[in-house]
Image: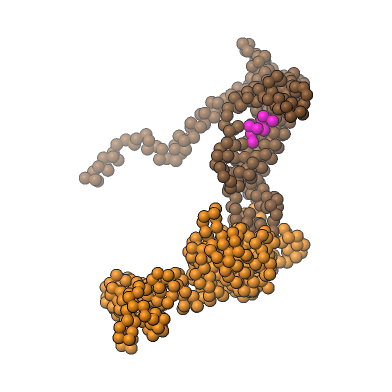
Amino acid sequence: MAVTAVSGVANRPIPRLRRLEDERWLALTLLAPTAILLGLFIAYPFFEGVLLSLTNTRVGIEGGFVGLKNFEKVWNDSIFRTAVWNTFWYTGVTTVFKLALGLWLAILLNRHFRGKALVRAFILLPFIIPTVLSTFAWKWMFDPTFSVINWTLFQLGFITKRINWLGDPDLAMASIIVVNIWRGVPFFAISLLAGLQTISPELQEAAAIDGARPWQRFWYVTWPLLLPVTMVVVLFSVIQTFADFQLVYVMTGGGPANATHLFATYAYQIGIGTGLLSEGAAISLAMFPFLFLIVVVQLLYIRRVETR
Amino acid sequence: MALVSIRNVNKVYDGNVHAVKNVDLEIRDKEFMVFVGPSGCGKTTTLRMVAGLESITSGDILIGDTVVNQLPPMDRDIAMVFQNYALYPHMSVFHNMAFGLKMRKFDKAEIDKRVRDAAAILGIEDLLARKPRQLSGGQRQRVALGRAIVRHPQVFLFDEPLSNLDAKLRVQMRVELKKLHERLGTTAIYVTHDQVEAMTLGDRVVVMKDGVVQQVGEPLELYNTPANRFVAGFIGSPAMNFAEVTLSASGGKVWAEAPGLKIGLPEPVARRVGSRNGTKATVGVRPEDLHVAGPADPAELCFDVEVEVIEQLGSEIVLDTRAASNAFVASVEPTLRVRMHDRLRLAINPNRLHLFDAATEAAI
């Protein structure tokens, strides 16, 4: 009975699902959704952006091919130069602070104390709250009239008149940097904490017996072992910060007087705000070589650390 | 040059877990002292208190003449070998071994000399440039030992250093550790849960249970005259047989009776028991102290059993037998012809019978 049943199955045409038993078909099937999504929402817009930047298209006007004219124009634009400088400054300063504070928090959180789980969860709050929402709260705190920061400083006797946080170019930059650090530290802290937890406590004990003082234990044991994780976290953070938009858009809109524009906000202002689509595309594309370089350098470094 | 004194030391975790209770020990200079016991008996905690990795709740620990209670590990002049080796994964073997010397600001030439000397002793000269992950378990263990040796410390502390190795390598490393200790003569404290390691390595052995020291003594002392039922059962393999008995005196002898068993206690034991007619006790006999009864064996030391399992080990036969409700393991001559469910008459070697108080479990 069993034998006839089996031969009956064999005589039927091969069901389509059977094809998946072939690894090539299976691989293709599994990769397809990701490939389609990436192609549709990343590769296609990127390709369109490149094409757009080579034309003189505006909103409502189909433009023609103009070569690298847009890039030339952007290069001679002083606001663009400010935006480039701002982006590097913003990314550099925030990354240094986020790494330092994140590492410090991670080391503190790696200790045993009462309510550890709760504190760890709370640390994540700035990261979880939608950026636009939390940035609006910060905007209120920096508001020239209603600033709680001004009120506090005034009550403590540090200032006698209001500070116009977002009205002064330097203070405005400092303000968005502070907010970015506030928002980014949890990601560093939690990621580095995860990294710290993979390091066996026995190594610390062995180093302590070997005669290493606490900072030597950190420098010779913890830090080198944490470095691969640190590099990945820094890589992600730099890419995100470099291309940041929401925070600056909500806080200052690039002002005062275009003093706090980053690549993304300036590209938006030119491309969408004033309708010069092709020029906006050129500005955002100018970001690409820098980001590409950062990614290549860091990936090479990570590979070196891993094979060391 | 270093004796270690552990004076009435206690360890209480979180105010309620009493992990180590009134441990009072003197480890002599150049002695190889082994702490043995089941997991959770406080042996590792005691070692970590000596190392300075764990604070002492009460009592004193001295290394040499110095009270080290408050000293950090680095100032105690000790070296420790961890169960999982705890090698620095990002450093080469050389730098793993050199790290402690580097931290203590030895000059480069001296570090180089000491590392190479230790590597030569351990036979790992060829591995100095490798990373720990490129080494086998046995090689890692040697590096961990090397890291301890180069420091020339006053005391070596070993925390179950062989338990991650496979059985064959463990035996080999055990022999090497013994040789190493002969050669260096450094005072050593060695923690293990393996009684064979304890017996073979220790000059003296401390048996612990539930944070309390059960007995301290030379290996054979523990084997021959265990202080209580726990030590008797823990030391020796296969483990000692126990039977709950009731004592009674008749015909000028003291008898120990249990279902299927009636043994006349040998003279010295009987004298120690005295007039404890009707009291409960535990009889203990090691498997190697049982043999198949012959005409020369006194009848009061013999009892009948049924064979349940036969384990042929080549050098001996281990029999699992049963006398009514009491199970007895006997290790007998390899020449014995025996089959399952055979009935045998076993005899206890005179003067090898142990008796323990039923309530306190102390040896009588």
Residue found at x 42% / y 77%: B364
Q: How many marks are shown on the rendered structure? A: 0
Magenta residues, dominant SS class: helix
Residue range corresponding to the magenta coloring: A178-185
- Of all chains in the rendering, the one displayed in brown is A
Q: Is residue A156 left or right of residue B43?
A: right
Q: Residue furthest bottom?
A: B296
Q: Residue furthest top?
A: A60
Residue occupying image coordinates x 67% and y 14%: A274
Foreground pick, A270 / A30: A270
Residue B329 visible, this orientation: no
Quarter the N terminus of chain B occupies: bottom right
* In this view, A257 is above or below A307: above
**Corner quadrant of residue A234:** top right
Instruction: Tell me which corner region of the image, top left, top right, bottom left or bottom right, holds residue B242.
Output: bottom left
Question: Image height check: is A8 above or below B302?
Answer: above
Q: Which chain is orange?
A: B
Q: Is residue B112 shown left or right of residue B176?
A: right
Magenta span includes B189 = no
